[in-house]
Every structure is written in C-alpha cells, then in structure tokens.
Amino acid sequence: MAKIEEVKANVEKGKTKLVPGLVQDALDEGNPAGDILQAMVEGMGVVGDRFSSGEIFVPEMLMAAKAMSKGVDVLKPHMAGSSSTSLGTCVIGTVKGDLHDIGKNLVAMMVESAGFTMVDLGVDVPAEKFIDAIKANENVTLVACSGLLTTTMPALKDTVATLKSCGLNGFKVIVGGAPVTEAFADEIGADGYAPDAGSAAVIAKDLVNAA
Ligand code: B1M
C-alpha cells in the first residue's frame, strides 16, 4: 500500500502512535503536504460515514480525530509558508456547544501563515468570549467562527449577531464549517465564508485588505 494510503487507513483506525511516523514517511517519499492532508481529511469523512451508519461510536471517532491531529502536527512545518506582512490579529474559535476543532485548527494554521497573529480561543466558545478577546488583544482585524454541527448553526448566528451589535469596530467576521454555506453566512450577516482552510486564508486576506 502506498504510504499516503497507509496514512488514511490508520487515521480511520485511530492509530495515534502510527500516524505521525507514516506522515513523515509519506513526506520522505516526496508526497506534497497538501495531498497527505487531503488523504487524512478523506479518512475523517469515512469515519463520519461509519459513525452515521452505526458501525462505530463516539470513542472511535475521537481516536481518529486524535490520530489526525498528531499527523497534522508533523505536516505543519511543511504547509503554507509564513508571510512577513502583518494583517493584524485574528481571533478564532469553534462556537458554543461545539467541540470539533480539527477544521478550526487547520483554518488557524493557514490564516496565520497568510500574515495574521492568531489568538485561538479553542472550542465551545460563547459569543461574549469572542468580544472579550477583541477587547483584550491589539488590532483585531478578523474574527473567525467555526461550527461543525447543524445544531450549533444557531450559535454561529448568535455569535455573528453579538459581534455585529457589540459596538466595537475595525474587524471582519468570517464563518465556516461543514454545514455552513455561503447563503447561510450571508443570511446571518457574516462578512465572509470559506469552504475550507486554504480559501479561508485567501478570503481573510482579501477582506482585511479591502477594509
Ligand atoms: Co462529530 N459529528 N460529533 N465528533 N464528527 C460530525 C461533524 C458528523 C457529521 C458525523 C456524522 O454523523 N456523520 C456529525 C454532525 C451531524 C450534523 O450535525 N449534521 C457529528 C456528530 C453528530 C457528533 C456528536 C453529536 C456525536 C454524539 O455525541 N452523538 C458529538 C457532538 C459533540 C459536540 O461538539 N458537542 C460529536 C463528537 C465528535 C468527537 C468529539 C468524537 C470528534 C471531534 C474531535 C475533535 O474535533 N477534536 C468528532 C469527529 C472527529 C467528527 C467527524 C468524524 C470528523 C470531523 C473532522 O475533524 N473532519 C465528523 C464527520 C465528518 O466531518 N465527515 C463528525 C475533518 C476536518 C478537517 O474537516 O472540520 O469539516 P472540517 O473542517 C473543514 C471545513 O469544514 C472547513 O475547513 C476544513 C477543511 O479545510 N472549516 C472552516 C471548518 N471550520 C471553518 C471555519 C472557517 C472556514 C472554513 O472560517 C472561520
């Protein structure tokens, strides 16, 4: 089996100890970091499908997430290069009620490499905590909110509404996550939407440069 396929298979099986070494082997074989990342994302898709069909349960899903995170740690230095321009500070978090962080972490990594200073609030972040972070950090130009559950889409809506009505200015709001669409982002008043981490970095840059 090609190393990149082994990476995918072992993410699916939640092999936390094996995945970092396999990712390194895949890199050593000359596979681009983006392709290895894509294989791991596809692996998580398989895990999600198995969960939906009742083949696996939350603990297996969690192990797969841990395995992928370990793999991403190895990939990090090989992903997008760092920019010397400063686009200000980005405050990022997964919204209240939502514990998914792999996609959010990828977005943080890519947006940071586009030239932002990153303040990562983690998961299950209430709207007020985003506001506190805008007040506590200098030159916040971007707030990025991630949501992975259909049940936390209302929390995304509340967060954007709170950010837009809090009386603070100078920042744009970008949203994303599997159930989020451009239409939903428009409907809730976000300034931007991105379907994946790579495009989040491009859109973040464009939004802040246009402000
Ligand atoms: Co959860 N989970 N999960 N889960 N989980 C999903 C999301 C699900 C689709 C699985 C399924 O049923 N097929 C389903 C949601 C269904 C729905 O709402 N429609 C689901 C469910 C139901 C649940 C629980 C409710 C299960 C339960 O307890 N019964 C529970 C909820 C807990 C909670 O959050 N309150 C739960 C728990 C968990 C774990 C904790 C076990 C674990 C997360 C661990 C972690 O993140 N550290 C987990 C996992 C791993 C998944 C799946 C399998 C994988 C998610 C993932 O990391 N994908 C997922 C199935 C799937 O995605 N197919 C599933 C890889 C990641 C790179 O993709 O996060 O989509 P993603 O990020 C993408 C884009 O969405 C985008 O960029 C990334 C790619 O570049 N993006 C942004 C993300 N954020 C963005 C922000 C942006 C822009 C783009 O701008 C700000």
Image (cartoon, helix red, strand yellow):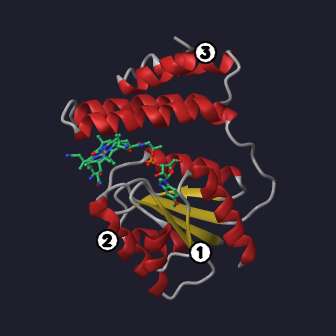
Answer with mark 1 or mark 3, whichever residue precedes in sequence: 3
- The residue to which callout 3 is attached is 25
Q: Amino acid at mark 3?
A: Asp
* Residue 207 quadrant: bottom right
Relative vertical location of residue 209 with respect to residue 85 in this rendering, above or below: below
Q: Are marks 2 and 1 in contact (CB under 8 Å)?
A: no
Instruction: Report the quarter where the C terminus lies.
Output: bottom right
- The 10 Å Cα crowd at callout 1, few under 14, some 14 to 19, many 20 or more, is many
Along the line of sight, which residue is nearer the eye, 197 or 96?
197
Q: CA distance from mark 1 to mark 3?
A: 40 Å
Q: Residue at x 41, y 81 (%)?
A: 161
- The residue to which callout 2 is attached is 154
- The residue to which callout 1 is attached is 172
Relative vertical location of residue 88 with respect to residue 172 in this rendering, above or below: above
Residue 197, numbered circle? none
Mark 3 element type = helix
